[in-house]
Image: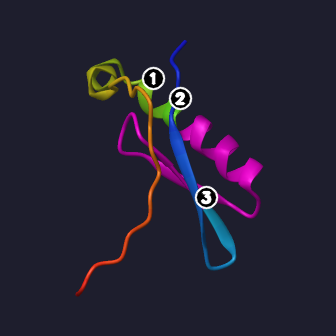
Amino acid sequence: MRSLKYVVYREGKYFVSQCLNVDISSFGKTIDEAVFNLKDAVELYLKDDSLTNLFHDVGDALIGEATVNA
């Protein structure tokens, strides 16, 4: 069993869930659906034993927002 860190944000009419431990994302019509779909996607991804070394533990996470001149 592994602990997952993720962020969820709204994009249009969907919620996008992005895993911080591996480069995987998913989406859903609700936050709960987006998180459920993300967990399912990560489980499927990690079933391939050659990819489990790409999973890295994430300690405390800070989600921020900033503006840039671009």
> Which residue sits furthest bottom?
70
Q: Are marks 3 and 1 in contact (CB under 8 Å)?
A: no
x and y percent of residue 42 in the render?
50, 35
Residue 50 appears in which quarter of the rendering?
Answer: top left
Tag of residue 47: 1
The local crowd at label 2, few if under 14, some if 14 to 19, many if 20 or more residues have their Cα within 10 Å, is few
Mark positioned earlier in the residue sequence (3 or 1)? 3
Give the position of the C terminus as an image quadrant: bottom left
| Position of residue 45 in the picture relative to residue 12 (left or right) | left
Q: Vertical placement of 55 versus 38: above or below?
A: above
Q: Which residues are magenta?
A: 16-41
Of residue 25 and residue 10, the one placed in the foreground of this image is 10
Give me the disc on residue 27. 3
In the image, what residue type sits under mark 2?
Glu
Return the mark for residue 43: 2
In what element is the residue under mark 3? strand
Determine the residue positioned at 61% across, 58% down.
Answer: 27
Q: Position of residue 6 (x, y in %)?
A: 52, 42
The kind of residue tagged 3 is: Phe
Q: Is residue 61 left or right of residue 33?
A: left
Circle 1 SS class: loop
